[in-house]
Amino acid sequence: MSSPTFDPSAMQRWLDHDNHDTRDGLRALFRDPLFTPRYNISLDEERDLALRRLQAICDAGLISVTDFRHNPHRIFSVHETVGMMDGSTATKMTVQFNLFGGTVLKLGTQGHHDLLLDDIDSLASIGCFGLTELGFGNNAIEMQTTATYDRDTDEFVVHTPSPMARKYWITNGAVHAHYVVVFAQLMLDGTNEGIHGFVVPIRDKARNVLPGVTVWDMGVKIGVNGVDNASIGFDHVRVPRSAMLDATSKLSADGELTCEVRSRRGRFLSLADQLLSGRLCIAAMTLGATKVGLDSAIRYASGRLAVGPTGKSDTPILTYQLQQRALMPLVAKTYALNVAFNHVKDRYAALGKTTDRETYTDVLLLCCAMKALISWHAEDTATTCRERCGGQGFLAANRLGEGIIGGHAGMTAEGDNRVLMQKIAKELLARADKRQIAQEAALAFVPGPLRRPLEAALGGDATAAVPAVLRGNLSDPDFVLQVLRAREQRRLAGLALRLNQGKKRGKGLFDVWMLEASDQVQGLAQAYAERVVYEQARAALQRCDPAWVPTLGRLFLLAALDGLERDLGPLLADGLLTPKSGRELQDLNRSLCRELGADALALVEGFGVPAHMQHAPIAGDWLAYNAFDNFGELLPELQRGAPAG
């Protein structure tokens, strides 16, 4: 390995972006043995451990629900740092402070704040978020849970009319939560006034389930078992009128409802707004876990000696092209996603109470894109690192399994990634210049010699349409950005054309979108998301130490080119790249992996995983860990569930 061209600690500070004192405070807290991984413990012990860890974070004052008002960046920074330590704790935290606490803060009024905010921060009152129902996970606006106003008693009656209406996968619900924010159809004098939120107690302070509430423990999952998920139902549970979160809808004592938002769909969207910041919390958690997994895998690959040119085991496996081609694009993408994520956090924090629909939609698309890309990347990284670490990667103590499961949890939480990509594509179509995309769709697959006459006939500018084949040097960042933009334009035009053709055939939008054009929908959203990441990565080069630009420039280029290589078939089929360019793309990626491999250790040191958080044996002296005397002493401790490492 060569000497790095940058100071890893300075790089860490640049990547961390904000709230350095809070991050440092968490890293210091994690020296406590409480935060050392434990194995072979019961389900009850796992859940208790996650709660005790969260309690320690709260006792240290390192997060507050009011951060959403004063310092939203802090919420996401805490999620990333805790995500490095324990996915279960991070998941319980994101429900307590974002979904439950954030909803009470934003949609509640002074009475709700006085009752709950301090207790949320101290964990004296634990909450959960009752949105998803068994039968309405992807169509929540049609949920069946009702909250019927009883004028005689000035109460709401919260009721689950069928098993399909039970709230499902409710984090914190099985054991710990005292309250749930219940989303329900507000029934007023026989009229459905749309979905509103209600703070409903489900347990007393001794954690006894209250009358009328039924809680089913979801049981053992494939991972993240420190999280107590539940199915929750309500049998005519009565709560006072003040239980309704009434920042945007108010019900007077005489039963008169006034709403700032007129439409039922609009009321639901305003209530579910906390999912927006939730997507950034999920992205932050999984980004933190990704950094830990890569840190372990790169350190192991740098020290694990295997067969070299002499036939002796004298060559670090990271020098193998097999390892470099697998691991270095993951490092590159982590850097690129990190700086793009920082940009999105800035955009979210600046959003405030803006009423500009276009600005809000911009941030919505960015949050959806970051959550999907980062959680997919987390799973891909953990799976690849597991394989490239061989049998060592299969040991629970090396934590790569946690990364795999955490990535999968991230793909589903706060919106299924594929559904989020559908939302991105829908918004892109809605915002597009219809005339321009119609022209590009008409020209997309027209042979070169015929394009200019057709453009003239369409009344278009010859420079406006996407060229049939892009020509340039893929080592040129400007050309790579041109390819990414052209791919997005081409896919936008192609999807618009497909939908229009379906309409002409008498097909409904639903049939074409959901049953025929799914690949095009997903492809457009992926193209948008990857283009945004590369644009923001390139912009970040203007804000870093100039001495880092050569290294970061190669990293960001590799991140973009790796995505193009994975998409090479469609790029060639669509005629955006030539077969010759495709071969050059693969050659260039191999070269970049080799060059950046020399800085691999310094690059993962830039992730800022301190030694006391490198619990995976392969991240340290894995040979000493596997020495017989040491292992013989550790094994009984592991079996008893004592700290490992």
Image: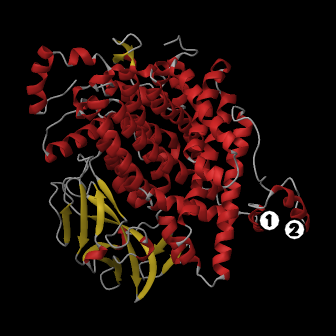
Q: Are marks 2 and 1 in contact (CB under 8 Å)?
A: yes
Q: Amino acid at mark 2?
A: Leu
Question: Element type at marker 2?
Answer: helix
Q: Is residue 207 left or right of residue 173?
A: left
Can residue 86 be seen in this snapshot? no
Q: Residue at x 33, y 29 (%)?
A: 389
Residue behind mark 2? 458
Residue 583 lies, with reference to residue 210, above or below; the image says above
Quadrant hosting residue 539: top right
Residue at image location 40% in from the left, 39% down from the top:
63
In front of the other: 15 or 436: 436
Of residues 442 and 280, the one drawn nearer to the viewer in this rendering:
442
Q: Around disc 1, counting alpha carbons within 10 Å, would you say few (fewer than 14), some (14 to 19), or many (20 or more)? A: many
Image spot of residue 88 (x, y percent)? 29, 44
In the rendered image, which residue does mark 1 sit on?
A: 439
Residue 608 position, x and y percent, is 44, 25
SS label for mark 1? helix
Point out the tag, 2 or 1, that comes first from the N-terminus: 1
Q: On the rendered structure, is 292 left or right of 583?
A: left
